[in-house]
Image (cartoon, helix red, strand yellow):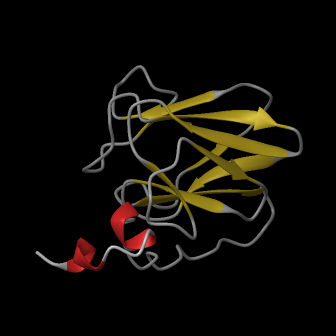
Amino acid sequence: MQELRILNGLHRGATLPLDAQPVHIGADESADVVMADHGIAPDHALLSPNGDGWLLTATGGAIYAADSSRPQQLVELTPGACARLGDIWLGVAWQQAPWQAPPPLPEAEPEFDPRAAHGDSTATEA
């Protein structure tokens, strides 16, 4: 069986066995997984079964793929993968698998400037 793991923050070390039911994650007491960390929205995300893995969907808060500093609407998670809700890392793993450390935060990605993409030399001037 797979489980949801909280890798850092106030609830570091907490787990939830995952079955075929979606899991609501947020700061509100009605969530299936209640997280009191700073930056967690009342209804932050939904974790749903998706084939052999899981799909994390933003429902009211920012979610990030492990390798990105840009908010995503959807993040696919397979066993061993992780994602961020704000600054909190979550992972999906097989119950008997060793725990992983939370990855370092990815470097900030530069903002896209459409003027620079089209050769406008004034795009970088302030």
Q: Position of residue 22 (x, y in %)?
A: 67, 27
Q: Which residue is drawn at 40% across and 28% down?
A: 43
Relative to 92, 118 lies left or right: left
Q: Residue at x 29, y 80 (%)?
A: 121
**Where is 94 relative to 51, above or below?**
below
Q: Residue at image x 78%, y 32%?
A: 19
Above-or-below relation of 21 to 86: above
Q: Which residue lies furthest to the top in this view?
A: 30
Q: Where is residue 31 in the image (x, y as percent from the top left)?
A: 45, 26
| Number of numbered callouts drawn | 0
Above or below, 83 relative to 58: below
> Residue 47: x, y in percent?
63, 36
Quadrant (top left/top right/bottom left/bottom right) for the C terminus: bottom left
> In the image, is residue 81 above or below residue 108?
above
- In the foreground, 71 or 124: 124
Quarter of the image holding residue 113? bottom left
Q: Position of residue 108 (x, y in %)?
A: 37, 74
Position of residue 68 in the picture relative to residue 39 (left or right): right
Residue at 88% from the left image edge and 39% from the top image edge: 51
Which of the pair 76/11 is nearer the observer?
76
Residue found at the far left of this picture: 126
Closest to the observer: 9 or 39? 39
State which quadrant residue 17 falls in. Answer: top right
The image quadrant that residue 67 belongs to is bottom right
The one of 29 and 107 positioned closer to us in this rendering: 107
